[in-house]
Image: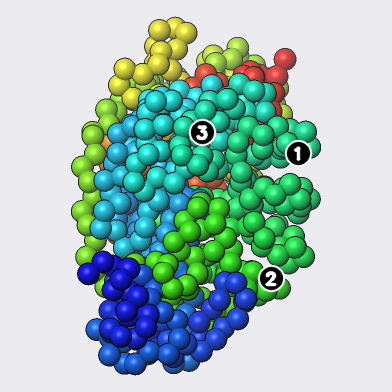
Amino acid sequence: MHEREQCRRVALARDPPTLLIKRGRVYSAFTGEFFLADVAVCGPLIAGVGTYPDRAGSVVDARGAFVVPGFIDAHVHPETSLLSPPRFAEALVVHGITTAISEPHEIVNVLGPAGMEFYLRARAGLPLDLRLMVPTTVPASPFEQAAGRLTEEQTAALLRREGVVGLGEAMDYMGLIGGQSGALLQRVAADVPGGAVIDGHAPDVTGHDLAAYLVAGPVSDHETSSPEMLLERRRLGMWILIREGSAARDLARAMPFLVQYGTERTALCTDDRNAAALAEHHHLDGVVGALARAGVSLHDALRSATVNPATLYRLYDRGSVTPGLRADLLVVDDPSFPHPRLVVRSGEVVARDGRLTGPLPPTPGLPATPFRLAVSRPQDLAPPAPDGLHRVRAIHLAPRTIVSDERVVEIRARNGHLVADPDKDVGLVALLERHAGGNLGDDGGPSVGRGLVSGLGLGRGAIATTIAHDAHHLLVTGIDPEDMLRAAQAVADAHGGLAVVDRGSVQVLPLPLAGLMTDLPVTEAGAQLRSLEAAVASLGVDFEEPFMVLSFITLSVVPRLRLTLQGVLDVQAQELVPVIVG
């Protein structure tokens, strides 16, 4: 019998449902009510919402509990969890995430189309629906040199693959506003029947520039949290994605706007959240709760995690408790803090009381990524300069934001290179091209970008990581170049990962999957990450999520100063600037 015909019979109570959730208080995404009803499930679909007899294959007594739609994370880069796709899904689904709009542009920057193929293969058998956006900016800007690339033809072909829902965030916002890349986006999007959803990335873009950005095609923005800019976007009908990640936590700043104006054309996302945060904290269940506690109506809070993102990404088969839609359902004890006791995805119970109910699929095979260390001498990690005192510009970091600033300070050079000055909170930072056959510098040697960093509070030691957005070369920062080289070598020997060096001791979290991910369970990966962060704190760094903060030093599409393989970039001026201030 055809699936819909079978479900019609279940809806009429002629045949038993495969799953029956009895006597729950069901949330309506369209009236804001909670009403007493049973939910009859037929295979992957909701067959009926009403009163049904207890003759199902499986009955869940939800008396006293609430039934809400499964949550949808509207924008996330799964690789920045540090977890393989199955482990990532395992970490999210216990918090009620039944769909994740995932853009794997980290791995695509490393592997190109093979990175997308990896995630397309990995979707099968996961306990949540991993929907994919095709990265649009690989590399992220003309100032980055990624090993992987996607052509226009490859992008158009990927848009037609099952599980792909649109084009990923258009990060080269300066190019779009200036007309350099907008035509390409529109051409690729128009090549899909009905057009493709294009995600945006528009930090601090306002006025005429914002209008030009919207004309170029993007429909959303997750880089804005100021109430004034959120209001401008809402007035223009732009979708707002409120981000609460590991490094970028925008909810508190956006909250006054959401309390006053609600969540029309607003969805919730995490963007970048690492394994430790996933293991220790709530996910969108916690964000919905925070909205409700701050004064956003519970109806608006729930819509921002359910029907709103479903509407944005044209997933019209989910997002509400509606007959005929997918049976993505949560049973929660308190909708104002909707941590689920039961998670149903496509009609199957996939998590109960914080644990998966079935096995995870294996992680697909991944092409080995060649790894080489671009330097062999410690002094190659420090910016060259004549001996003496110099006025220099440092990339200044601040906690809980990925936006950097410029700090001008005086430090010394010795033996032809600038030296770190912990007393002035100035450390060295270098970006090393890590791919075999990579770019060469002007002297014919490996490409290395060198600069200075402040705000970290580093007093000694070194930190290295191959999580360095978006091209993911090897980033290392520290006080002593010898420690920096030791940390970089430890990461290279692990074929990617995170490392801390302190007084000669080396601690490493290997990330062998493209230098980005591990197949460890979230609790183990999170514990190792927290151990590394404790080692970083002992060096003087007083940042939450220090590796996540460091990873954005190299993202060439977020203001203000960034480090590239070519040197220090002023994002707003769109030009490379010298470390020494003339």
- Residue that label 1 marks: 206
Q: Is residue 27 above or below residue 555?
A: below
Residue that carries the numbered disc 3 in the rendered image: 190
- As drawn, the label of residue 296 is 2
Q: Nearer the viewer, residue 523 or 139?
A: 139
N-terminal of the pair, mark 2 or mark 1, is 1
The residue drawn where x is 60% and y is 36% is: 217
Q: Residue at horizontal 51%, vertical 86%?
A: 25
Q: Which amino acid type corresponds to the residue marked 1 in the rendered image?
A: Thr
Residue 104 is situated, as x and y percent measured from the top left of the image, at 41, 42
The location of residue 32, given as percent across then percent down, is 62, 76
Whole-angstrom CA distance, mark 2 to mark 1, is 26 Å
Dot 3 or dot 1: first in sequence order is 3
Question: Which element is circle 3 on?
Answer: helix
- Which amino acid, mark 2? Val
Image height of 156 relative to 17, above or below:
above
Q: In this view of the protein, which residue sits in the foreground, 21 or 495?
A: 21
On the image, which quarter does residue 558 sit in?
A: top right
Q: Amino acid at mark 3?
A: Ala
Q: Residue at x 66, y 62 (%)?
A: 263
Of marks 3 and 2, the one in the foreground: 3
Quarter-of-image position of residue 6? bottom left
Q: Is residue 437 left or right of residue 455?
A: left
**Between disc 3 and disc 2, whose residue precedes?**
3
Task: From the image, state whether disc 3 or disc 1 is nearer to you.
Answer: 3
Position of 335 compared to 467: left or right? right
Q: Residues within 10 Å of mark 3 (few under 14, many from 20)?
A: few
Q: Is residue 439 visible?
A: yes
Position of 542 with respect to 23 (left or right) is right
